[in-house]
Amino acid sequence: MTVSKLRDTLVSADGQPVRVLCGGQGPPVVLLHGFAVTADMWRLNLPALIEAGYSVLALDLPGHGASFRPRRPFCIADLARAVSAVIEAEVAGPVRLVGNSLGGAVASEIALQRPERVSHLVLVNALGLDPCVPVFKRANYWTDLLVPGAVQVLAGPRSWIWRRLSRMIYYAPERAPDGVTILRYPGGWRHNHVGRGWVGWGVFWQLATYRRRLAFAQRRAQLTVPTFILWGEDDQLLPVAHAYTGQALIPGARLHVFPQCGHAPNIEFADEFNRDVIAFFQTT
């Protein structure tokens, strides 16, 4: 199946619209993107999962893409509840849950809350495994997230601010094909900007202090589902040290680190990423 044959549709999360990319037949895999991108970040991975015999469902988190716009600060627990509602409505049986960055934090929260609904957990450069998060330092939060995020809405995809953000995400930006991520899809970034702001504020407030981030990370030690951590060695947003902290925290967690790779190994090393994830599903 090619990417063009994926169904791009809206489903309901407790009466609210959520956009999903879905296709295939077989055991279900649910994929959650990071902050400020959309389900399109998985377009290099979905066909391989389908060809391996899985059904896939990649969704736009609330406040992102074509999904509903929150009307208040939306924290990780809120996102987890919304995703769980989609899973309950659309997917039968336990799911293989894959999450990148913020989506990884949401995925681990779902696995903690509903372990009977998660058979495998894949955390890709995931938020929430280590309390030392550079981007949550006050200066970095303003210079690396809020200001560039606001400016690029007006500046357009050819501006220096877009190039800067692309370099923050990728070790080698040229590895990212057009249309895979929101950084190459400006219309998608502009859409739902207010909703994304509510999510950003909710997550920042939830994890604003070191103590809160430490408590969040320590809860990951209670995970009981088989877990695979994948990380880009040169991630500028969530350092690779978080991967090793996560492996030490989560009982039995596997780890694979991609050299010369940034925040999205599923894009920069798509083929290797796909092989690793499918092998984890098939052998665990």
Image (spheres, rainbow, N blue to C red):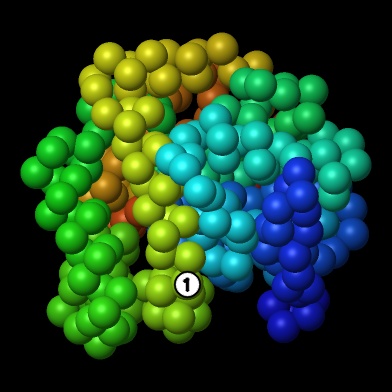
Residue 86 at x, y = what percent? Answer: 76, 46
Check disc 1: other Cα within 10 Å, few if <14, some if 14-19, many if 20+: some
Please indicate whether residue 70 sits to the left or right of residue 150 in the image.
right
Residue 132 at x, y = what percent? Answer: 23, 28
Which corner quadrant holds the C terminus? Answer: top right
Residue 155 at x, y = what percent? Answer: 23, 81
Query: In the image shown, does 238 or 53 lie closer to the viewer?
Result: 238
The residue sitting at 16% across, 79% down in the picture is 160
Q: Amino acid at mark 1?
A: His
Please indicate whether residue 130 sits to the left or right of residue 78 in the image.
left
The residue sitting at 75% across, 65% down in the picture is 10
Which corner quadrant holds the N terminus? Answer: bottom right
Q: Secondary structure at mark 1?
A: loop
**Residue pointed to by mark 1:** 191
The residue sitting at 26% across, 40% down in the picture is 239
Query: In the image shown, does 255 or 153 lie closer to the viewer?
Result: 153
Q: Is residue 199 above or below residue 116?
A: below
